C-alpha cells in the first residue's frame, strides 16, 4: 500500500530532493511551499506521485490549520521549511531577520506538527521528521538566533517523543552540517558570490544526502524509532574553544588575576 508524506519547504534544496526520492520509491506526496510556480513545476515533473500541492507559508497559523487540519492520511510529516538570515553579531543584526527565523523555524514547525499530530494519534500511526542543524548543538559567531531556533527543534523533538510514549507515532530529529543548497543564498539575501565562498574548497553534503537519510529513517521497521541523527561532510568537524588573548598583558598581571 502506498504511503503519503507531507513535505514543507518542498520547492528547493532538501525538500525537493526528498520529493524526488520518495516519488521514485512509490510514495504519494503532498508538497507545501511558498512559491506556487515551483510547486507546479515539481508536480509536473513527478506526475501522479503528487497528490496535492499547497501554496503555504508556515508562519501563517490560520493557513496552516486550514490547509493541513483536514488531512487524514498523512503517514510522514517532514518539517523541512526553515532558513537562516545573516551572520552579523547579535548587537548588529536586523531584528526583522530574527523575527523571520523564529516565526519560520520555531512557530511554523510547531503549527504544522500540531495541525497533523491529532490524526496520527487517532490512527495510532505516523512519523514526524524534523530537520534541524548542527548549529543547534555547536555555536559559531553569527549563528545567534538561527542556532537557538534549531536547538529548540531538537528539544521539541525529544519532548514530542516523551508525550507520545504509548503511541505508535515516531519522531526523528535530523541535524545536517554544512550542506550546499539555496541555504546560503537565502542567508546572504541573494549574494551568490558570498554564498559560494561558504563552500570554497569543500565537498559539502548535498540535498540528496539528506533525502537518503530521511528515507532511511522512515523506512525502518515500525517498532524502531531513530531519535536523532547528526551528519557532516568529512571536511567539517569541531574546533578548539576560541580564546581572545591580550598579548600586551604581562605574566605578572595574569598571575594576579588568577589569584583574585
Image (cartoon, rainbow, N blue to C red):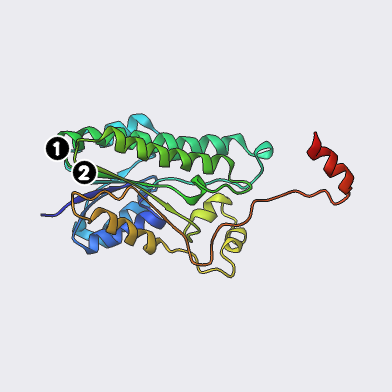
Residue 249 appears in the figure: no
Element marked by disc 2: strand
Q: Position of residue 45 (x, y in %)?
A: 28, 62
Residue 215 appears in the figure: yes
Q: Identify the residue at image location x=87%, y=48%.
A: 251
Instruction: Name the residue carrying label 1.
Output: 123
Disc 1 residue crowd, few under 14, some 14–19, many 20+, Cα 10 Å: some
**Is residue 235 found left or right of 19 in the rendered image?**
right
Point out which mark residue 126 bears.
Answer: 2
* Up-down relation of residue 113 to residue 85 (above or below): above
Q: Residue furthest toward the front? A: 259
**Is residue 140 found left or right of 131 in the rendered image?**
right
Q: Quarter of the image for the C terminus: give it.
A: top right
Q: Identify the residue at image location x=62%, y=46%.
A: 142
Q: Quarter of the image for the N terminus: give it.
A: bottom left
**Is residue 12 found left or right of 240 in the rendered image?**
left
Q: Position of residue 181 (x, y in %)?
A: 47, 59
The picture quadrant where one finds residue 123 is top left
Q: Position of residue 254 (x, y in %)?
A: 83, 44
Q: Position of residue 147 (x, y in %)?
A: 53, 43
Amino acid at each position: 500500500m502506498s504511503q503519503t508524506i507531507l513535505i514543507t519547504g518542498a520547492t528547493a534544496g532538501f525538500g525537493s530532493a526528498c520529493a524526488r526520492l520518495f516519488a521514485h520509491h512509490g510514495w504519494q506526496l503532498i508538497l507545501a511551499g511558498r512559491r506556487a510556480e515551483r510547486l507546479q513545476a515539481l508536480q509536473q515533473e513527478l506526475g501522479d506521485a503528487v497528490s496535492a500541492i499547497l501554496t503555504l507559508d508556515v508562519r501563517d497559523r490560520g493557513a496552516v490549520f486550514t490547509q493541513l487540519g483536514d488531512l487524514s492520511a498523512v503517514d510522514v510529516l517532514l518539517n523541512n521549511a526553515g532558513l537562516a538570515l545573516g551572520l552579523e553579531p547579535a548587537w548588529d543584526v536586523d531584528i526583522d531577520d530574527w523575527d523571520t527565523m523564529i516565526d519560520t523555524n520555531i512557530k511554523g514547525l510547531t503549527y504544522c506538527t500540531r495541525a497533523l499530530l491529532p490524526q496520527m494519534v487517532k490512527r495510532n500511526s505516523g512519523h514526524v521528521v524534523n530537520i534541524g542543524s548542527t548549529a543547534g548543538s555547536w555555536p559559531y559567531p553569527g549563528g545567534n538566533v538561527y542556532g537557538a531556533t534549531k536547538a529548540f527543534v531538537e528539544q521539541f523533538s525529544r519532548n514530542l517523543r516523551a508525550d507520545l510514549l504509548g503511541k505508535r507515532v515516531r519522531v526523528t530529529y535530523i541535524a545536517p552540517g554544512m550542506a550546499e543548497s539555496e541555504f546560503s543564498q537565502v542567508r546572504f539575501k541573494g549574494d551568490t558570490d558570498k554564498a559560494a565562498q561558504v563552500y570554497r574548497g569543500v565537498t559539502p553534503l548535498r540535498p540528496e544526502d539528506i533525502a537518503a537519510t530521511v528515507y532511511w529513517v522512515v523506512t525502518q521497521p515500525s517498532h524502531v524509532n531513530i531519535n536523532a541523527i547528526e551528519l557532516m561532510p568529512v571536511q567539517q568537524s569541531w574546533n578548539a574553544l576560541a580564546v581572545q588573548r591580550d598579548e600586551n598583558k604581562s605574566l605578572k598581571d595574569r598571575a594576579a588575576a588568577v589569584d583574585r
